[in-house]
Amino acid sequence: MADTRTPTRPVRRAVTLAAAADVAAVLVFAAVGRSSHAEGVTAAGVLETAAPFLLGLLVGWLAGRLWRAPLALPLGVLGWAGTVVVGLAVRAAFTHRLPVSFVLVAAVSLAVFLLGWRAVALLVTRAKRAGHHSN
């Protein structure tokens, strides 16, 4: 018979940590962007810049159902796509402009941040498993 209980504590912890890492990645993206354009790197300013992308991240998490396997790169790509597409669309709706250069920088930067930590986590997990099995 299938187990229909709620996820175990380690699974919930992994989902929580993955969501927190994604939010942190978007906030770092916004802070770096503000800094590189000589805008103030204040909490309010970073949140204002990050808000459209945080909304996109939420949409990506929900559409991709990232909680099922938050470290999986294919699901991470869905989260990244939601972050970029929705984030850029919302930003363009408020600023009434969307330079191609910003689209490219945002897409690449967010890919590095959102997929990069997942790649590192997967490598660490695989290395731990390989070390555990060799003993």
Image: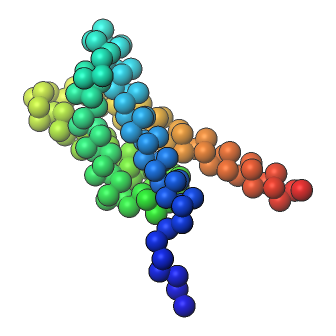
Residue drawn at x 30%, y 49% is 58
Residue 108 seen by the camera? no
- Total residue callouts: 0
Query: Farthest bottom residue?
Result: 1
Residue drawn at x 42%, y 47% is 19
- Where residue 129 appears, as percent x and y from the top left, is 75, 55
The reply, left or right, for residue 90 in relation to residue 2 is left
Query: Farthest top residue?
Result: 38
Query: Farthest right residue?
Result: 135
- Where residue 45 appears, as percent x and y from the top left, is 25, 21
Quadrant location of the N terminus in the rendered image: bottom right
Q: How is the image coloured?
A: rainbow
Examine the image and state in which quarter residue 107 appears.
top left
Seen in the picture, residue 134 relative to 42 is either above or below; the reply is below
The reply, left or right, for residue 19 in relation to residue 89 is right
Seen in the picture, residue 24 relative to 9 is either above or below; the reply is above
Query: Farthest front residue?
Result: 9
In the image, 60 versus 106, the foreground residue is 60
- Where residue 36 appears, as percent x and y from the top left, is 36, 13
- Where residue 51 appears, as percent x and y from the top left, is 24, 35
Quadrant location of the C terminus in the rendered image: bottom right
Residue drawn at x 52%, y 82% is 3
In the image, 62 versus 13, the foreground residue is 13
The reply, left or right, for residue 103 in relation to residue 109 is left
